Image (spheres, coloured by chain):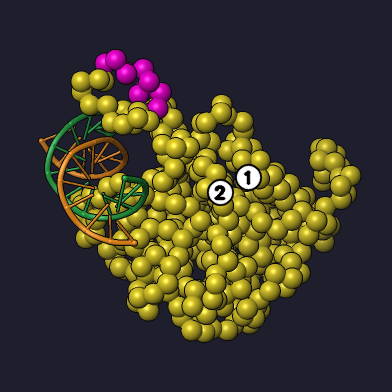
Chain colours: A yellow, B green, C orange
Amino acid sequence: MEHRGNREQGTLISELIQGMELAKQLRVHLDTASSAESMDLLVQKILSSYEKALLILQVSRPMSMGQPQQNVGATSGVPESPLSINGSPRSDDLDKDNQDTRDVSKKRKMLPRWTDHVRVTSENLLEGTHDDGYSWRKYGQKDILGAKYPRSYYRCTYRHTQDCWATKQVQRSDEDPTIFEITYRGTHTCVHGNQPVPPPASPEKQEYKLTNLNTNNNQQLQSQDILSNLRKGLTVNTEMATSFSFPSTSFGWLKTENHSFSPSGVLDNNNILNSFSSPFTSPATPELNYFSASQPQMNSFGGMLSTQNSEPDLKELISANTSATNSPIIDLDFSLDQLELDPNFQFDAQGFFSS
DNA sequence: GACATTTGACCCTC
DNA sequence: GAGGGTCAAATGTC
């Protein structure tokens, strides 16, 4: 818990720093009478940065013990479904447990929710395992109207033992069966679930081709895939590299409260790694475990990143400390000292923008 | 035996 | 009433 809190604090600070850096850039633009378009983009990025910082503050706001973090995706206080932690209250006991179940339902309804789109390819079908560091247990499957493939429902394995209410839904795309839409709901409050993803035992065996696809968010999420792989010492797949187009026209996207994405800015050569500040954690569903696999090789990364990047390499690259992270539950795992944060820096209103 | 998955049924929301 | 989300008994796997 404390670990998570520290990470969130780190992310928060990095977002604020980003906002400051962007404001500085904007000031330069103002001085040099740059185009309105470029300044508008900077403003967009600044707003995005602060929006994310606010989201983090919302998510990490202290809740009562044992309660999952709430909110971000909360859309309503209306109870969603009467459930109790001990089971499913049927009509018999609905009355006596009415109040309790209402509270639990409300809690669930308010769980943050966001969606990732993950692509797996045919060569990924046969080997390897892949998980997001969390332990999921399937609790249901439904045929969805108008969908070719059933939707699977997963909850955290530690729901009952640790009152962890994280769930996810996995829906295979009709249009492209290699794409899975994964909707996460709630954040993990379990200790197990917070364990980092273990490093791959054999990079060449565990390289996987995961590409988040979404007409709106793919740039951002793909970059996270790439970073995630690089962090793990994995090679980067060509499909990733080619679908991750930069420099100057790639938008980052920020997930918003209504579970969609909003543009968080334009990536340029200086802040390509913006979007790398949040390592993508990929799903651990049986389907995806089954589909993940090896793809022997791959090298370029738009000519900018070589394969098998080491952590030190990334540190250098990340030194451009702007960010376009997308999830309110951000798992920032590079340390603040890499950001060269002045320990005496104060986020006061004046100094923040005038330094 | 413990734990995970499957699947039919139940409940809620719209 | 339809559709989606969840439960829990039955079944499977280790």
Horizontally, residue A289 falls left or right of residue A189, namely left
Q: Chain of mark 2?
A: A
Q: Is residue A351 visible to the viewer in this orientation of the structure?
A: yes
Contact check, label 1 and label 2, Cβ < 8 Å: yes
Labelled disc at residue A194? 2
Q: Chain of mark 1?
A: A
Q: Nearer the viewer, residue A127 or A77?
A: A127
Main SS of the magenta part reads: helix
Q: Check the picture and name the quadrant holding the N terminus of chain A.
A: top right
- Disc 2 element: helix
Give the CA distance from mark 1 to mark 2. 8 Å
**Which residue is at a point 81% across and 37% down the rendered structure image?**
A349
- Disc 1 element: helix
Location of residue B2 in the rendering, given as x and y in whole percent from the top left corner:
36, 46
**Which residue is at a point 74% across and 71% down the rendered structure image?**
A312
Horizontally, residue A20 falls left or right of residue A245, namely right
Q: Which class describes the residues within 10 Å of circle 2: few (<14), some (14-19), or many (20+)?
A: some
**Upstream in the sequence, badge 1 or badge 2?**
1
Quarter residue A175 falls in? bottom left
Location of residue A190 in the rendering, given as x and y in whole percent from the top left corner:
51, 42
**Which residue is at a point 27% across and 63% down the rendered structure image?**
A174
Location of residue A339 in the rendering, given as x and y in whole percent from the top left corner:
78, 57
Location of residue A95 in the rendering, given as x and y in whole percent from the top left corner:
26, 16
Q: Nearer the viewer, residue A57 or A313?
A: A313
Is A97 inside the magenta-drawn segment? yes
Per the image, the residue denoted by label 1 is A4
Horizontally, residue A321 falls left or right of residue A202, namely right
Is A145 inside the magenta-drawn segment? no
**Which residue is at a point 62% across and 33% down the rendered structure image?**
A61
Q: Label 1 sits on what residue type?
A: Arg
Q: Which residues are magenta?
A: A95-105
Q: Is residue A215 visible to the viewer in this orientation of the structure?
A: no
